[in-house]
Image (cartoon, coloured by chain):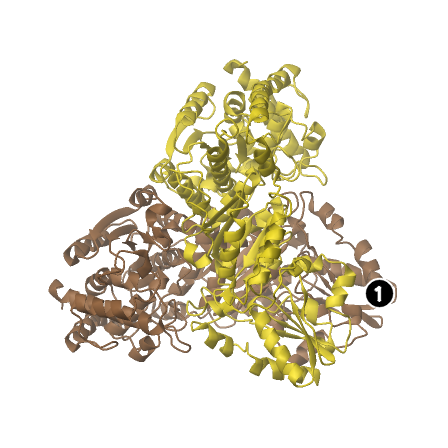
Chain colours: A yellow, B brown
Amino acid sequence: MTLAPDRFAPMANAIRALSMDAVQAANSGHPGMPMGMADVATVLFAKFLKFDPADPYWADRDRFVLSAGHGSMLIYSLLYLTGYESPTMDDIRNFRQLGSPCAGHPENFLIPGVECTTGPLGQGLAMAVGMAMAERQLNATFGNDLVDHNTWVVAGDGCLMEGINHEAIGLAGNLKLGKLKVLWDDNKITIDGDTSLSTSEDIPARYRAAGWDVFSCDGHDYADIERALTEASASDKPSLVACRTIIGKGSPNKQGGHEVHGAALGMDEVAATRENLGWTSEPFELPSAVLADWRSLGQTGAKLHAAWDERLAVSAHAAEFKRRMAGELPNGDAIRKALAEWVEGDATVATRKASENWLNVIAPVVPEMIGGSADLTGSNNTKAKCQAPFTADDYSGRYVYYGIREFGMAAAMNGMALHGGVIPYGGTFLIFSDYCRNAIRMAALQQTRSIYVMTHDSIGLGEDGPTHQPVEQVMSLRLIPNLNVFRPADAVETAECWNLALESSETPSVLALTRQNLPQLRKSGDMLSARGAYVLRSAEADRKVILIATGSEVELACKVREELEGQGIGADVVSMPCMELFEAQDEAYRHEVLPHDPSILRVSIEAGATMGWERYTALSRNGGLNIGLDRFGASAPAKDLFARFGFTTEVIVPKILDKLSA
Amino acid sequence: MTLAPDRFAPMANAIRALSMDAVQAANSGHPGMPMGMADVATVLFAKFLKFDPADPYWADRDRFVLSAGHGSMLIYSLLYLTGYESPTMDDIRNFRQLGSPCAGHPENFLIPGVECTTGPLGQGLAMAVGMAMAERQLNATFGNDLVDHNTWVVAGDGCLMEGINHEAIGLAGNLKLGKLKVLWDDNKITIDGDTSLSTSEDIPARYRAAGWDVFSCDGHDYADIERALTEASASDKPSLVACRTIIGKGSPNKQGGHEVHGAALGMDEVAATRENLGWTSEPFELPSAVLADWRSLGQTGAKLHAAWDERLAVSAHAAEFKRRMAGELPNGDAIRKALAEWVEGDATVATRKASENWLNVIAPVVPEMIGGSADLTGSNNTKAKCQAPFTADDYSGRYVYYGIREFGMAAAMNGMALHGGVIPYGGTFLIFSDYCRNAIRMAALQQTRSIYVMTHDSIGLGEDGPTHQPVEQVMSLRLIPNLNVFRPADAVETAECWNLALESSETPSVLALTRQNLPQLRKSGDMLSARGAYVLRSAEADRKVILIATGSEVELACKVREELEGQGIGADVVSMPCMELFEAQDEAYRHEVLPHDPSILRVSIEAGATMGWERYTALSRNGGLNIGLDRFGASAPAKDLFARFGFTTEVIVPKILDKLSA
């Protein structure tokens, strides 16, 4: 069934009323965008979007991403109006209040119909690129019968002005993601005022330069909107639809101005808007005919869903498809078994190389792993032999050449993970975690299984110098909630950490890996890394010291221990590949590894910022000792830098002796 | 005097020889770019660039920015060949070795002729935008006689693919920075291979869409290069010159391929290149005629410099111009005096508002302060009343509408500071420090006086929710070396911290400010913040507790103290607006504020990540106590959030009592 466009105006006004009333009740929020885009959204949901309110997780639904997340009342309105279970009208009434899933910005972990968490501008669209990539990859793998859907995005001027937009649309253009459609809320207004204050860009020309099709419409003319969306739907390129709108449309005295962007209209203007729109319902009440029209929209999707269910039921791929979409790893503990069987001999390799070696073991048995790098494939060692490139000519490939686009890559990975059916990992130098830091944070907030492979993880990268040498990055990433930061010490820990990252379906991971070679310190892959930290070497003499180290400094800690033992001073070496997992262990285990014994000196050794290590060292003999690097590095061969900055037994052992005798 | 183009080939080959030999000697580095751009650089320095090797700091020199910083041997070659004092040939021979100023990437703090530190891709060009902005602002202020120079940039595909490029060129285009000229090394190669692997963008079309002029040339045809640079010079728009080049040009077997990008040619290929170029000199030796031609180039600039000196000598603005370019604040301690005279009464204001109030005091007396915001002017409170907008129509303005471009803004600010003569500050929400984090790091590395005004600094921002609530940002910024992170507690501390930021000419600052109101805790502006931390309230009863807090939690600490005192438990409140400055105090002062007394319990209170606070608390009674937030926030009114997450006396006082009795 199809609604005639003369039914659209009251439907769009329902969005406007809910939005202005919810913002007014909270006295906080952004009414301008939902009111301005209400007409476009109504046509999209009525005529184009494939969705089934009864099942927000239907695998072949169209993805709808509200990249301009501050307009959250738009999506809350749409989900309620079309009949999703969440949010309820009570939730909307409690917009932006503690406990309501109708948060200030849409959050995927609170409402199933919200595909991704948006608000940090530009990232919604960039995640949508990843969703469209995942769709094409699964389509190439499972065929049109199971996977064939669009990704629709609503984006504002802010999303388009952010740098990440350039990266996202360049990637989408090169990959010819024809099922990606972006509806640009072209309202000529930013927070500071008219867009001309800060930009004079010809946006359609830029999108065309990136290989996109561009269409436009009057965003308040239903027929014109439908025409433009029809044209966009027919394009085999990624499409931008410039929807010329009036921000806050409906508010007689405030529409078109920047004040309506981010503040409640005020009681008087809410009343004036009601009158202007001819909207007589009380706040949070809806005319039954309008609600009925909205509720009718889900029927088309429900039928398509039913037909899809039938195809899935008879598909030879059904089990595999369901497994991947459920995010379950293949064959239970096959990966752990592979690890137990795979232990490199006396492998002296960089952990980035160990990572590649392990990828060559697991990537063939975990076909949903989609790798990539931001133009550092040979340096990040991220490409497994079994992976062909993912290109516009062959979407079945499993390796993405992301280009020099760290932020775009990280956000696309989040979108791929949110889409489901694939497990994305991608590489860059650790220093450039700075370039994509907020996408890593958004992975953590959204609880996605994104795996960031960050190589060249310290001054050990050598000659490239301080611009390329991470100093504070490892510790600063540890500060992000719900993120596991792994810094493995050798080939065995690298494989273990990779497995932990894969098994961690609701927590993203960073793997911090070395450029330089490291000796193998352990002979068995018995998953000691799963505890986050463990005693790698036990004191032989009377224990006076516990050395706690990560990554490349574990080797150094072992050498320091030998020197100390040679002087009759017993020392444990604790390898701590993942602080977060160690913190999650029970107290008994933590005390076993780091006993509360004030006679023992605890020493941290990590070639990075020391702040934070006091958590494990300060409460020990004489206040503990932290060996690290609290300044920028320098350009020189790695071994010279480690010597210059005191990462040698000659420097560290005397410091420990001094501290013991203090 | 002007060299005929037939002298250019050996001059360009001198760059090629130095570059390949230096990289070969280091067995590390990037020969491809300097060899590919040698011809373009030769024409630029011979015919267009205004420079005086005798004075790298001449205020009216053209700025030359090597945005593709990995090609550092290009600039080291050029500086040596044209006769700058630094680098020496010995420095070049020790390229990428400890102690040589010829670092892997060019570093402004090692070589005066290097205008800015580059390597993190895209930022050089973005800093050049800031330099061109500073030039126009000073030109509008001091006139053509004193300030009238170009900013030239060499950029590669990586610089253009990064998101920040979109922000930078959009800003430059809107501001019509006609004296900015970008030479794009269009060599069709990235590290992973051909550029078509990752991009199919029409770059000239994108630049035109942003309001730029675009020219092109054969980057190995001297006449064609000169034609294109002449056209670019004549344009009144920012200009891109697409220089079609062959990467590694001159290497007979490796040129044009991606292997020559980032690795030494190898001894055999170095020899083959010598033969191919007809270059018979030994490594690090130069034919005297070629060197003489290069050394002759500085004469034009020296004459221009002498004429400029004469104009400066008779300029009515000379003293003020010199003061600004020297980076000296006006009138010695006028600002401190203003502070002493300016103390708000019982001001209950947000610190973002206190910041605005203070800006209205100091901006009129420090005319080199150039403010701005990434489209959050009304929220960041960054615009002083005396500041008119800096626009294409009026470059004398002192307030920049940066648009929704946090990274571009932060990098432009660094470029403005590096140019000199202005002190840039700019605002965004603290959460979006994530978007510009590496530019903040680059300010710290480059020792620029960039002042980042970061408001909405905790869950205190309320309803916008976890995407907008900083949790880990304050602590993670503290990890960056040479960066002062200020989190003032009230109006007085805000003014003090602003002054400290202004006085700190070689260390950038972050001011983390609240959205919500805070009471005034101190009545006098006696610069206690300069010590980083100080005792704000002293224990009255026998001191058992020291409460250490920052920003909005200092008020809470005072309330906790009152409760404790009411129970006979003496407690100090230490306000710590700047950890870095506290760390820089002598031991006596630090012990005075935080005495080593194991009977005293130290408690940190900050509405953010606790990791790091153990530095000040762990070594105290029963291991100390850290009150913070180690999870993401939520969407709700601020007061509900502070209650929900335990930032109340009701929650904290019992925790302290428990700890005291543990």
Q: Quadrant of residue B656?
A: bottom right
Q: In this rendering, does residue A456 appear at all?
A: yes
- Within 10 Å of disc 1 (Cα), the crowding (few <14, some 14-19, many 20+) is some
Q: Which residue is mark 1?
A: B565
Question: Left or right: A468 with respect to A564?
Answer: left
Q: Quadrant of residue B604?
A: bottom right
Q: Secondary structure at mark 1?
A: helix
Residue at 65% over, 80% down: B587
Relative to the observer, which residue lies in front, B518 or A23? A23
Question: Left or right: A342 with respect to A95?
Answer: left
Percent from the top left, x then y, of residue A610?
A: 61, 69
Percent from the top left, x then y, of residue B343?
A: 63, 63
Residue at 11% over, 64% down: B6
Q: Quadrant of residue B201?
A: top left
Percent from the top left, x then y, of residue B611?
A: 67, 62
Relative to the observer, which residue lies in front, A108 or B256? B256
B555, above or below B284, in the image: above
